[in-house]
Image: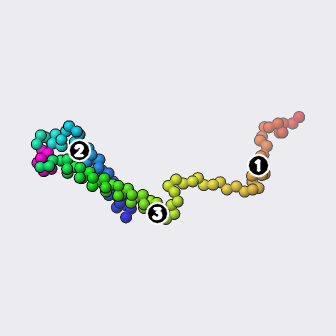
């Protein structure tokens, strides 16, 4: 189920990118991209603004719903306490902390040189 929602989420994101890039600015019309009169024939009499606005709204709603669904699925996974994992604690014994480590003499030190 999670894989299906992820695929729908990615498709909605790609649709949003495409629809937002296709929308016109304040002074331009969609017909400018296809030629002067293509807006009326391609998207109907009302032009591209209604079609693109509605398609963008639907894509935003799908994207938002899949985002919430994926967040819900991730938060309710069995065995997952947090997204950020704490580092593993180093276990020490009481005797190892109090006793100093013994070191062997290194060859060539002052102890090995005869007087």
Decide if residue 42 is in sight here.
Answer: no
Quick one: label 3 or label 2, which is nearer the N terminus? 2
Image side of residue 89 versus residue 29, left or right = right
Examine the residues drawn in magenta and state their main secondary structure: helix
Dot 1: within a 10 Å radius of its alpha carbon, few (fewer than 14), some, or many (20 or more) residues?
Answer: few
State whether residue 13 appears in this view.
yes
Residue 76's label in the rendered image is 3
First in sequence, mark 3 or 1: give its number: 3
Residue found at x 75% / y 52%: 97
- Report the span colored magenta: 38-44
Q: Position of residue 29 (x, y in %)?
A: 18, 41
Pick out the residue farthest to the right.
Answer: 115
Mark linked to residue 101: 1
Q: According to the image, label 2 marks what residue?
A: 23
Q: Residue furthest top?
A: 115
Q: Nearer the viewer, mark 3 or mark 1?
A: 3
Callout 1: helix, strand or loop?
Answer: loop
* Front: mark 1 or 2: 2
Distance (Cα) linking label 3 and label 1: 47 Å
Residue 69 placement: quadrant: bottom left
Secondary structure under the numbered disc 3 in the rendered image:
loop
């Amino acid at each position: 189920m999670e894989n299906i929602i992820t695929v729908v989420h990615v498709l909605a994101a790609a649709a949003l990118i495409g629809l937002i890039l296709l929308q016109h600015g304040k002074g331009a019309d969609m017909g400018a991209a296809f030629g002067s009169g293509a807006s009326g024939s391609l998207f109907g009499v009302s032009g591209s603004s209604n079609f693109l606005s509605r398609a963008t709204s639907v894509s935003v709603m799908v994207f938002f719903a899949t985002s919430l669904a994926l967040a819900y699925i991730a938060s309710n996974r069995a065995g997952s306490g947090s997204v950020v994992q704490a580092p593993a604690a180093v276990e020490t014994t009481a005797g190892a902390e109090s006793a100093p480590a013994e070191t062997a003499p290194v060859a060539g030190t002052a102890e090995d040189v005869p007087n």
